[in-house]
Image (cartoon, coloured by chain):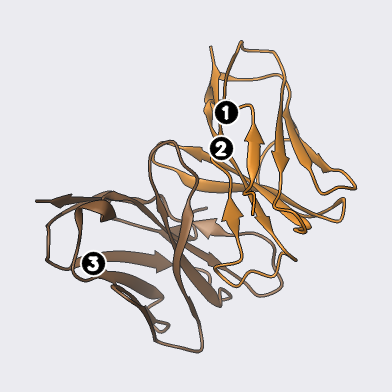
Chain colours: A brown, B orange
Amino acid sequence: DQQVKQNSPSLSVQEGRISILNCDYTNSMFDYFLWYKKYPAEGPTFLISISSIKDKNEDGRFTVFLNKSAKHLSLHIVPSQPGDSAVYFCAALRSNDYKLSFGAGTTVTVRA
Amino acid sequence: KAGVTQTPRYLIKTRGQQVTLSCSPISGHRSVSWYQQTPGQGLQFLFEYFSETQRNKGNFPGRFSGRQFSNSRSEMNVSTLELGDSALYLCASSLQGQFAGNTIYFGEGSWLTVV
């Protein structure tokens, strides 16, 4: 049962424009959400996270928005750069749990 | 500081065989989690160990097992390999297992191909 869903397997965006990645979840017990970036042949690296008590968290070019009522979060990358081309995973967890539930990932390609 | 080290990086096994993968967490980290990544499936949680105890387990068959040693190094074992076990197996290390986003560190993974 996929509790975290990324319905867009791929996204192509022009350099300098905004990339918007979406993620939906079904488990209302999730209270912490994370985004990871993964290059081929490397492990995922942490990008940004948000607690369920917030609706927005910003870190440089990356902003994550959380809509708890809709069980939806999104990652905005502004401006997009060629080095942002990678697979992005959305993940969620419950406090005091010890496992991350991941989405299937969205492959982002930034065009020059 | 040294990152999470996984060995071997690449391996090929035959159906029916068994395989053992190793993970050395970051020094001082006591929590080790294992994930399986297959195309289109994202990362699926296998299990998590803390201080040599398994604290949580994902929905994988009993052929998948793991353990953690007193030095926090962890191994996972897959017995009676099936073609569908071909995947990237990722290990994640954290201090306590109480995730705060940037306290989880992943290794580069072990690519397993079953033929």
Looking at the image, residue B72 lies above or below residue A61: above
Q: Is residue B1 left or right of residue A110?
A: right
For the point 58% across and 60% down, which residue is it?
A100
As shown in the figure, which amino acid type bears the numbered disc 1? Arg
Q: Are marks 1 and 3 in contact (CB under 8 Å)?
A: no
Q: For the residue carrying disc 1, how many other residues have a C-alpha within 10 Å: few (<14), some (14-19), or many (20+)?
A: some
| In-front residue for pair B97/A6 | B97
Looking at the image, residue A69 lies above or below residue A107: below
As shown in the figure, which amino acid type bears the numbered disc 2? Gly
Same chain for mark 2 and mark 1? The answer is yes
As shown in the figure, which amino acid type bears the numbered disc 3? Ile
The CA distance from mark 1 to mark 3 is: 33 Å
| Label drawn at residue B109 | 2
Q: Which residue is mark 3?
A: A20
The CA distance from mark 2 to mark 1 is: 6 Å
Q: Secondary structure at mark 3?
A: strand
Tell me which chain the residue with mark 1 is part of.
Answer: B
Q: Which residue is mark 1?
A: B9
The CA distance from mark 3 to mark 2 is: 28 Å
Q: Earlier in the sequence, mark 2 or mark 1?
A: 1
- Specify whether residue B15 is in view: yes
Q: Nearer the viewer, mark 1 or mark 3?
A: 1
Q: Are marks 2 and 1 in contact (CB under 8 Å)?
A: yes
Q: Secondary structure at mark 1?
A: loop
Residue B108 at x, y = what percent? 54, 40
Same chain for mark 3 and mark 2? The answer is no
Residue B11 at x, y = what percent? 58, 19
Q: Are marks 3 and 2 in contact (CB under 8 Å)?
A: no
